[in-house]
Image (spheres, helix red, strand yellow):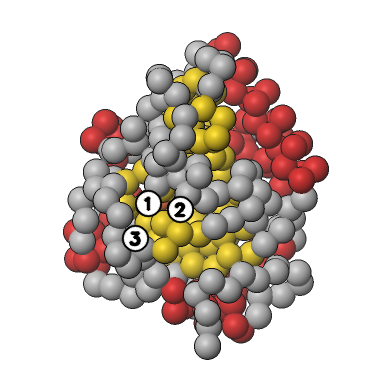
Amino acid sequence: MLDINKKYKLVDKVEDEHVAFYNKYGFVHYQNFITDEQIQRILKSLNEGYEKLVAEGRENINGIPINYGFDENGKSIVHRLPFSNLIADEVAKLYDDPRFKLLAKFIPDYESRLGLKEKDGVVTNYYINTDKSNFRQMGWHTDVTRDVMVGKKLFPMINVGICLDDSNETNGGLRIIPGSQRQSVMSMLFTKVQFVNTKKDPKEIMLTTKAGDLTLHDGRTWHRVGKSPHMGAKSRRRVMYVPLICGPVKERDENGKTPFYHKLNKLAKLK
Ligand SMILES: O=C(O)CCC(=O)C(=O)O
Ligand SMILES: [Fe+2]
């Protein structure tokens, strides 16, 4: 029962089985959440955003740093764009989709909301291997650790991902330790050296996704993003995340200070 490779469709309802799967493994994979046409519109809107940010020399959005890089043709891109929804209209529009409201069923005990104006907003990650690239992978971590570091009470948190490229071992792929959301706070913080450890774990599984798929993972699960063995276009992997959060609302604006964990980024193993 509950085959770990099971993939679902999100039509008009989160089924009890989806919740049971999520509670057991700490993630869920919904196929074909958005169409190719939507993806193309979003990518175009993001690319226009990158160009504008590069031209302006913008360093952060609402205090969260922008991580710049270059694609396989030497063109400037953004490896990690926080608050993408404030930069690209098509990204903002996507989150008006009423199906996002259905996801509240995964956090039954609290009233939840998408963190469109909180934390880092919608984050678009753009991994690519080029000679100059400083964003090829992401070491092991748990997402809620950031909240622990800023001294916040821990509320349930789900990271909601939308794949803009197919994602698998060719271009890296998201690796999760299934069930690792059911652990003590100590092991959530200290099982691995966060962001520095990039080693394959025998218990990890890879989420093999197609562009347009939606994935959810519990903010307490251990996960990492693998490094593509290829260079250039073949290694490209773009994915957007927004957190589904609960607890006190804490919106960020232009006066937002850079949280200190972003200053620790230099230690993260991204290359
Ligand atoms: O790129 C991914 O699929 C995961 C990124 C991630 O874990 C994060 O940004 O916290
Ligand atoms: Fe993460």
Q: Mark 1 points at which residue?
A: 224
| Left or right, 48 with reference to 241 | right
Badge number at residue 174: 2
Mark 1 residue CB less than 8 A from any atom of ligand 1: yes
Outermost residue on the right side: it is: 37
Badge number at residue 222: 3
Disc 3, SS: loop
Q: Do the residues labelled 1 and 2 touch (CB within 8 Å)?
A: yes
- 1 or 2: tag closer to the N-terminus: 2
In the image, residue 176 sits, relative to residue 5, either above or below, namely above
In the image, residue 96 sits, relative to residue 5, either above or below, namely above
- Residue 174: x and y in percent read 46, 53
Disc 2, SS: strand
Q: Are marks 3 and 1 in contact (CB under 8 Å)?
A: yes
- Amino acid at pointer 3: Trp
Q: Are marks 2 and 3 in contact (CB under 8 Å)?
A: no
- Mark 2 Cα shell of 10 Å, populated few (<14), some (14-19), many (≥20): many
Residue drawn at 74 percent across, 37 percent down: 40
| Left or right, 64 with reference to 99 | left
- Residue 152: x and y in percent read 32, 56
- Amino acid at pointer 1: Arg
- Residue 36: x and y in percent read 76, 45
The residue lying toward the viewer, choosing from 261 and 251, is 261
- Mark 3 Cα shell of 10 Å, populated few (<14), some (14-19), many (≥20): many
